[in-house]
Amino acid sequence: MVVMGRVIGPFGVSGRVKVFPYTEYVDGLLDHPVWWLGKNDGDADWNEVKVAGCEIHGRLLTAALEPYIDRTAAMRLKGMQIAVPRSRLPALSKTGKDGYYWADLIGLEVVNLQGEELGKVAGLLETGANDVLQVQSRKEGEEERLIPFISQVIIAVDLKACRITVDWGLDY
């Protein structure tokens, strides 16, 4: 499964939900008439749901998912991850820098050129100027780091080693 977004809460009273997409383009999930919902906590328990309707609202989506028909049911979906089986996604080029989906980066360790651990990728943001990695530190009380996803900073993405190497200091 490739996680492509998360439910951030209910929208209205008819069971629609607000969705924060992890896709490169906000409408990336509109191509999929069926989504799988789960917690993505290592548990392979994904529940298939049919998308009865989906609309773009700024940088978010609102979606009607069967069989969720009221606000109470939609509220229970808050925090759920939205995924699609990798087999239903377009094939990626094996060469070049576009050889992975954003979802592939979630959970990867981020280390700098000095070998210092900066944390794990918690998400990505599209800012307009460039994409940004949201890196959550393992250290208690340390704030999230925002690291530009640009060639001058991202040195290597190694999916096999589950690591992203960056030219970024601990004190940035």
Image (spheres, helix red, strand yellow):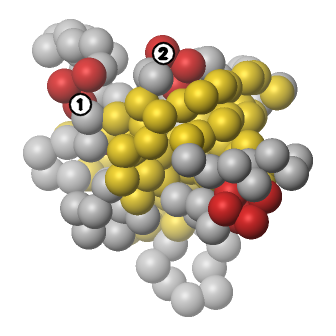
Rendered residue at 64%/87% (across/down): 141
Q: Quick check: 70 left or right of 119?
A: right
Kindly identify the amino acid type of the residue bearing the numbered disc 2: Asp
Compared with 125, 169 (above or below) is: below
Total numbered labels: 2
Q: Quick check: 37 left or right of 2?
A: right
| Disc 2, SS | helix
Quarter of the image with the C terminus in it: bottom right
**Can you tell which of label 1 and label 2 is closer to the viewer?**
2
Q: Which quadrant of the figure has residue 111?
A: bottom left
Compared with 169, 26 (above or below) is: above
Disc 1: CA contacts within 10 A as few (<14), some (14-19) or many (>=20): few
Compared with 42, 135 (above or below) is: above
* Residue position for label 2: 31
Q: Which residue lies furthest to the right in this view?
A: 12
Residue 35, visible in the rendered structure? yes
Between residue 8 and residue 154, name the one nearer to us: 8
* Residue position for label 1: 86
Rendered residue at 56%/89% (across/down): 140
